[in-house]
Amino acid sequence: MKGVINLAADIYSEDLYCISNQTLVVIPENWHNLGVPEKDLITRFVEALKQHFSVTKISVVSESAITTSLINQCKASLIISFGVPLPEIEDKYLPVKYHSAELILADSPAEMNQERKEKLWAALKKRYSR
């Protein structure tokens, strides 16, 4: 049976299963290192994206930087960055074009307060109202 699994892995490469046109949520540290409030915030945020904007293709990844390689590998159309900075973009909470994707920079999960959550929600409404 092990040979069948290896054969299937060779035939069906990972690229066949890449979800294109997805929303990528980038967090600055490993999920297991986040505190309960931060995990809860990200979980509620992902659920809200699904419910209010009908977003079905969402991946949460832990990265220290946003690169074109990451965008291309994940085939992201929208990237929401929680605390992962991008030096060439200064404005937070505004949807901006970055290579082949749109990007919204936000503060890290630990720094998100009510005002920042509302700014992020307003940026998402602006992005999805087009």
Image (spheres, rainbow, N blue to C red):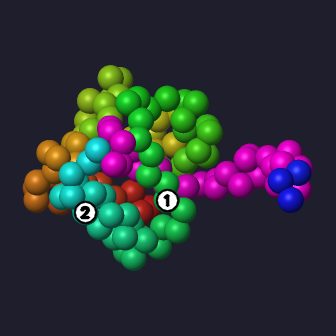
Residue at the far bottom: name it: 51
Specify whether residue 15 is in view: yes
Residue 62 higher or lower than 88, as above or below: below
Instruction: Return the mark for residue 58.
Output: 1
Crowding at mark 1 (Cα within 10 Å: few <14, some 14-19, many 20+): some
Q: Secondary structure at mark 2?
A: helix
Q: Nearer the viewer, residue 13 or 89?
A: 13
Q: Quadrant of residue 48?
A: bottom left
Which quarter of the figure is the C terminus placed in? bottom left
Q: What range of the chain is rendered magenta?
A: 4-32
Q: Kindly identify the residue that appears in the image at 54 percent across and 49 percent down.
A: 77
Q: Quadrant of residue 97?
A: top left
**Where is residue 40 drawn, in percent x and y?**
25, 63
Q: Amino acid at mark 1?
A: Ile
Crowding at mark 2 (Cα within 10 Å: few <14, some 14-19, many 20+): few
Q: Amino acid at mark 2?
A: Asp
